[in-house]
Image (tube, rainbow, N blue to C red):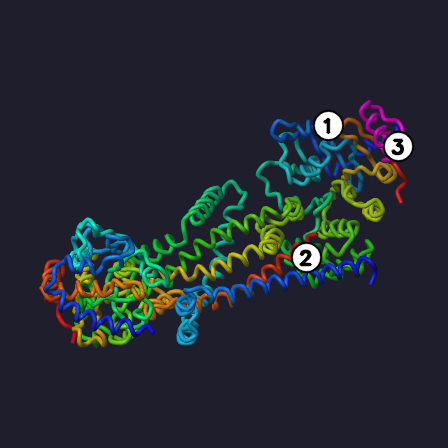
């Protein structure tokens, strides 16, 4: 070990020590001080009842399958619609001006309107026009609402990615005699998509949580199931169950996104 | 010197030029970049464009390749007007290759994939069937070991050579080079210029915008000095470099010579 | 620990109620003294918004609607004049969360259940609600009948936080899982868009929704109290261990004894009769 390495090792030991000490102190404060509060037993009974936790967990996990299913079929649709909207917004040809306008309106509207309103409007409104069962299912139209909203965000992220590809790349492709669509498909998009993977991972994590909003129009997913238990048992522990289940999914996803983002930053520098 | 130059021009006039520009003008907004450029290049001729930055060299090359539509004038390729507005540019661009200063290669593809993309898409050929021919080209330009590397694994000089091979893969009749060594570290310039010399021996028709005065002097058949959107002076390199007649050519050459612009090509 | 006050207070309330039935309002006022969250005032909470027929026009301070009228009658028996009654609004969650409350009691059709009783206190019931099935005319035309067998085949919806949901799940046992919603408005919206056929409400609410909210609403039938495992009884909700409970129960007993509670019920919930009983 040379002089600098020794110094850095010392520094590292110090920072680990400080981090560990402060974490332990904080946890100790929570574990020791909070139960000393006069209302703790009441709060514990309402939010952290082990009995309620175990009793509700199986049904809560079952309800979480609904979240996963909606998430699973929404994601590819969002990718497709988002890509289409991004391409519509990025088209250069003057003949496709209406497409560009349509793409812009789509993106502005669905990014500007609260997700909940879109879900109500499409989830109740479209079936209200008189669609027969099963085509009026809240699962279908709730999904449509989520897909429209998230596609608008994804489209903007993708368009940012497309714009970030240096114009020389396009010129290089065009000068080889490739068509505009080939240039987009083989040269610009692959680079753009790679650059926006981390941003889109964040959208996926947000989507995973927003799937729960479909419960407003009927589907009984995990948050709704928690609400039902809350009412029946007059206890908030089921929400803690839901939080634990969500964290079990989103924390690894977030870590993975950070990892991708760091790797990309390393590659750039 | 002069009679010789005239003789060459007269010779060019007898034979129909491969590439011919007549009165080409190009304006960006209020800025007139090209103000009536006339330029001929015979088959197999290497024409070097020199001149100050912003004089219009790059724009001229981009206009020939139809990357920029021209405002007035004509561009003829084998006597055919390719500057006709509304003409489909794709088939023409395949006949005219161009290599840029930087950001040439597609970073997400291997060198081989870069080279084969256009033939694959346009002629429907597969990478596998193109590999032997590509390998031969790579080897010829000193890149035999680099077919499957990604651009960021190659040096700047190697990248530019791959870019040249990629343009050659479409078997163009004319090649345009836009300052292809300006972004390179000095020690890498030579290997790229060597490729241009090899192409000249192959008889490729080339128009080269360059700051490498030594290269222009030693390798070019003809040197054109472009200034303020027109060709201010042109002739064989010996004439331009030894006895420039135009005052602006003289002051330009004095400036670049003082900067050490002319040095022996490695 | 939590069982103790409920039972003992219940008996206490019965005894005191018998005593207070003949007593004056003045005596009851003394009972509440110093026990309200604001001295000399009675703070009552209801839902936001509050619906007909429980509260008319979302204005409980007018005393119109069943719950508004009950609230003022209870207040009167406890010795509070009309202008000494303050209204606040609360959601269901606010009402049952642990910690201090900003109301003396809360009424918004809270069904009394043992689980809830562990966290909060309930008064004596002021209303026993029958559960009723709300459908649209289309379902009736399609052959829906007030019989369990017929109800099973319908697509059900319910408000997630209500005691109606267990009734749907345990008593009707529909063939497909019910869809759940936040409030009555969303349930009726889902009925309008044809996503559900039927929903379960307490009878007064069902009648109101059928008459006012849905163009073609029909109250198909009601469950008699003995068909449901535990009849749905509404109580005034109070903070756990609220000392006011004795006075509130006393006042309710007095209202039941002198027939004024029945009179209020007749005035505001009179249509609740005449709906067929489900077989």
Q: Position of residue A100 (x, y in %)?
A: 48, 44
Tally of numbered discs: 3
Circle 2 SS class: loop
Question: For the magenta stretch, what is the residue range?
Answer: B238-261
Tell me the residue that label 3 is attached to. Answer: B238
Q: Position of residue B188 (x, y in %)?
A: 83, 48
Residue A244, placed above or below residue B228: below
Pointer 2 indicates a residue of which chain? B
Q: Position of residue A237 (x, y in %)?
A: 41, 68
The CA span between labels 2 and 1 is: 39 Å
Tell me the residue that label 2 is attached to. Answer: B109
Which image quarter is the N terminus of chain A in?
A: bottom right
Residue B252: say if magenta: yes
The CA span between labels 1 and 3 is: 21 Å
Dot 1 and dot 3 residues touching (CB under 8 Å): no
Circle 3 SS class: helix
Q: Are marks 2 and 1 on the same chain?
A: yes
Q: Kindly report the secondary structure that dominates the magenta region of the rendered protein.
A: helix
The residue that appears at 16% across and 73% down in the rendered structure is C224
Question: In this view, which residue lies farthest toward the top?
Answer: B247
Label 1: few (<14), some (14–19) or many (≥20) C-alpha neighbours in 10 Å:
many
Q: Is residue B186 left or right of residue C16?
A: right
Q: Is residue C46 left or right of residue A237?
A: left
In the image shown, does B150 or C92 lie closer to the viewer?
C92
Tell me the residue that label 1 is attached to. Answer: B230
Between discs 2 and 3, the one toward the N terminus: 2
Pointer 1 indicates a residue of which chain? B
Residue B26: mark: none
Q: Are marks 1 and 3 on the same chain?
A: yes
């Amino acid at each position: 070990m040379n002089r600098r390495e020794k110094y850095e090792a010392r520094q590292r030991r110090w920072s680990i020590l400080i981090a560990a000490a402060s974490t332990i102190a904080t946890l100790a404060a929570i574990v020791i001080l909070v139960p000393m509060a006069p209302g703790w037993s009441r709060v514990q009974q309402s939010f952290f009842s082990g009995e309620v936790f175990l009793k509700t967990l199986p049904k809560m996990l079952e309800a979480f399958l609904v979240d996963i299913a909606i998430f699973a079929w929404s994601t590819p649709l969002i990718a497709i619609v988002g890509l289409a909207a991004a391409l519509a917004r990025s088209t250069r040809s003057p003949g496709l001006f209406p497409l560009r306008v349509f793409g812009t309106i789509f993106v502005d509207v669905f990014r500007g309107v609260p997700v909940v309103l879109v879900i109500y409007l499409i989830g109740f409104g479209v079936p209200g026009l008189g669609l027969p069962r099963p085509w009026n299912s809240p699962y279908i139209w709730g999904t449509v609402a989520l897909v429209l909203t998230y596609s608008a965000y994804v489209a903007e992220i993708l368009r940012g990615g497309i714009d970030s590809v240096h114009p020389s790349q396009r010129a290089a492709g065009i000068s080889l005699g490739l068509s505009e669509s080939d240039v987009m498909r083989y040269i610009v998009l692959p680079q753009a998509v790679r650059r926006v993977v981390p941003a889109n991972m964040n959208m996926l994590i947000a989507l995973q949580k927003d799937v729960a909003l479909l419960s407003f129009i009927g589907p009984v997913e995990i948050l709704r199931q928690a609400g039902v238990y809350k009412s029946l048992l007059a206890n908030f522990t089921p929400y803690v169950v839901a939080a634990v289940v969500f964290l079990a999914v989103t924390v690894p996803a977030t870590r993975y996104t950070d990892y991708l983002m760091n790797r990309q930053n390393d590659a750039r520098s | 010197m002069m009679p010789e130059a005239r003789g060459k021009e007269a010779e060019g006039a007898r034979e129909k030029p491969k590439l011919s520009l007549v009165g080409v003008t190009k304006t960006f907004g209020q800025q007139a970049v090209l103000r009536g450029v006339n330029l001929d290049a015979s088959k197999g001729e290497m024409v070097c464009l020199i001149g100050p930055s912003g004089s219009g060299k790059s724009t001229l090359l981009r206009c020939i390749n139809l990357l920029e539509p021209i405002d007035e004038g004509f561009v003829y390729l084998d006597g055919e007007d390719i500057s006709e507005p509304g003409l489909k540019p794709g088939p023409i661009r395949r006949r005219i290759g161009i290599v840029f200063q930087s950001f040439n290669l597609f970073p997400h593809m291997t060198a081989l994939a870069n080279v084969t993309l256009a033939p694959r898409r346009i002629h429907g050929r597969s990478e596998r069937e193109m590999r032997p021919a590509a390998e031969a080209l790579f080897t010829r330009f000193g890149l035999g070991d680099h077919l499957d590397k990604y651009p960021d694994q190659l040096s700047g000089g190697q990248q530019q050579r791959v870019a040249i091979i990629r343009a050659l893969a479409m078997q163009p009749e004319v090649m345009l080079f836009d300052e292809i060594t300006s972004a390179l570290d000095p020690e890498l310039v030579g290997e790229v210029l060597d490729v241009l010399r090899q192409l000249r021996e192959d008889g490729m028709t080339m128009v080269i915008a360059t700051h490498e005065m030594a290269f222009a002097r030693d390798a070019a058949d003809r040197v054109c000095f472009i200034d303020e959107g027109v060709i201010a002076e042109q002739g064989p390199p010996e004439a331009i470099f030894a006895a420039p007649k135009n005052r602006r050519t003289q002051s330009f050459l004095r400036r670049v010579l003082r900067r050490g612009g002319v040095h022996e090509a490695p | 620990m939590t069982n103790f006050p409920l039972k003992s207070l219940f008996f206490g309330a019965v005894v005191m109620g018998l005593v207070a039935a003949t007593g004056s309002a003045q005596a009851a006022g003394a009972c509440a003294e110093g026990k309200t969250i604001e001295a000399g005032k009675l703070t009552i909470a209801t839902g936001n918004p509050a619906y007909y027929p429980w509260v008319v026009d979302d204005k409980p301070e007018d005393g119109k609607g069943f719950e508004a009228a009950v609230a003022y009658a209870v207040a009167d028996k406890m010795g509070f004049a009309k202008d000494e009654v303050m209204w606040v609004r609360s959601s269901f969650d606010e009402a049952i969360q642990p910690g201090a409350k900003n109301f003396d009691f809360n009424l918004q059709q809270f069904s009394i259940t043992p689980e809830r009783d562990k966290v909060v206190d309930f008064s004596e019931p002021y209303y026993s609600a029958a559960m009723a099935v709300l459908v649209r005319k289309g379902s009736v035309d399609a052959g829906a009948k007030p019989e369990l067998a017929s109800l099973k085949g319908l697509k059900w919806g319910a408000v997630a936080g209500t005691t109606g949901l267990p009734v749907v799940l345990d008593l009707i046992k529909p063939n497909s899982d019910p869809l759940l919603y936040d409030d009555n408005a969303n349930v009726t919206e889902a009925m309008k868009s044809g996503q559900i056929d039927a929903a379960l409400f307490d009878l007064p609410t069902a009648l109101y929704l059928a008459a006012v909210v849905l163009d073609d609403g029909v109250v198909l039938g009601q469950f008699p109290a003995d068909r449901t495992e535990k009849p749905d009884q509404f109580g005034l909700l109070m903070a756990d261990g609220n000392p006011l409970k004795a006075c509130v129960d006393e006042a309710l007993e007095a209202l039941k004894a002198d027939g004024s509670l029945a009179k209020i019920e007749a005035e505001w919930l009179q249509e609740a009769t005449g709906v067929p009983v489900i077989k």
